[in-house]
Image (cartoon, helix red, strand yellow):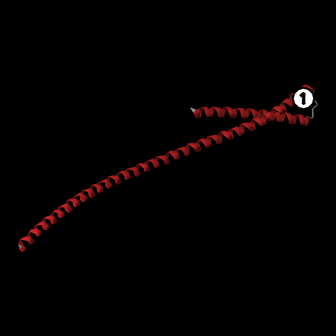
């Protein structure tokens, strides 16, 4: 729908420019004819010719303005397309960054779980070592007690 409106607008501008070009050409032909013939005319005819000449100059200025506006419009359309492209690239880069952040987070969570498992295992081994240490101390105490009784019974 936008391209249809753009097409209609472009056709109108083309038609207007064609009309203005034809008018300018007609006015130039009239000026050349007047110059070649060097006709002296009454004031009313001179005023009309002056008006035609002024209109021709105005037409040229308007044609130039139309061309300038068309170039500005093309530049604005190009800039908008470029901005849309940059936006898409930025969105894609953001998506990649988000996926990377998710991967890093998942890896960190997995590392944390492994660390917790190792810590649990270390605690269990520490508890086992502490229990065996207590058992050893108990056995040493028993041995000393039994060893003290043996030395008393052999001496007495």
Hey, which residue is sitting farthest bottom in the picture? 155
The image position of residue 43, as x and y in percent, is: 92, 26
Horizontal arrangement in the rendering, residue 81 relative to residue 41 (left or right): left
What residue sits 6% from the left and 71% below the top? 153
Q: Where, quadrant-wise, is the N terminus in this rendering? A: top right
- 119 vs 32, left or right, is left
* Mark 1 crowd level (few <14, some 14–19, many ≥20, 10 Å Cα): few
Residue at horizontal 64 percent and vertical 40 percent from the top: 76
Q: Quadrant of the C terminus?
A: bottom left
Residue 6 location, quadrant: top right
Under tag 1, what secondary structure? helix
- Image coordinates of residue 104 in percent, x first then y, are 41, 52
Q: Which residue is mark 1?
A: 46
* Depth check, front residue: 134 or 50: 134
- Nearest the viewer among 135 and 79 is 135
Where residue 97 appears, x then y in whole percent?
46, 49
Q: Residue furthest right?
A: 40
Q: Is residue 53 above or below residue 156?
A: above
- Give the quadrant of residue 148: bottom left
The answer to whether residue 92 is left or right of residue 15 is: left
Observer-nearest of 152 and 112: 152
Please name the residue shown 14% across and 67% down the image: 144
Front position in the image: 33 or 73? 73
Question: Which residue: 75% across, 38% down?
Answer: 64
Tell me if residue 58 comes above or below residue 85 in the rendering.
Answer: above
Spot occupied by residue 19 in the image (x, y as percentages of width and height) = 74, 32
Which image quadrant is residue 84 in?
top right
Considering every residue shown, the one lying at the far front of the view is: 156
Please give left or right for residue 25 compared with residue 104 in the image.
right
Number of labels in the image equals 1
């Amino acid at each position: 729908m936008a391209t249809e409106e753009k097409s209609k607008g472009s056709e109108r501008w083309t038609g207007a420019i064609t009309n203005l070009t034809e008018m300018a050409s007609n006015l130039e032909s009239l000026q050349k004819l007047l110059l070649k013939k060097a006709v002296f005319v009454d004031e009313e005819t001179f005023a009309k010719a002056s008006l035609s000449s002024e209109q021709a100059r105005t037409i040229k200025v308007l044609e130039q303005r139309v061309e300038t506006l068309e170039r500005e419009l093309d530049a604005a359309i190009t800039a908008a397309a470029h901005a849309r492209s940059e936006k898409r690239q930025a969105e894609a880069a953001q998506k990649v960054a988000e996926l990377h952040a998710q991967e890093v987070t998942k890896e960190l969570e997995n590392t944390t779980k492994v660390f917790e498992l190792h810590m649990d295992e270390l605690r269990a081994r520490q508890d086992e070592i502490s229990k065996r240490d207590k058992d050893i101390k108990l056995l040493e105490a028993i041995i000393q007690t039994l060893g003290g009784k043996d030395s008393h019974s052999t001496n007495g």
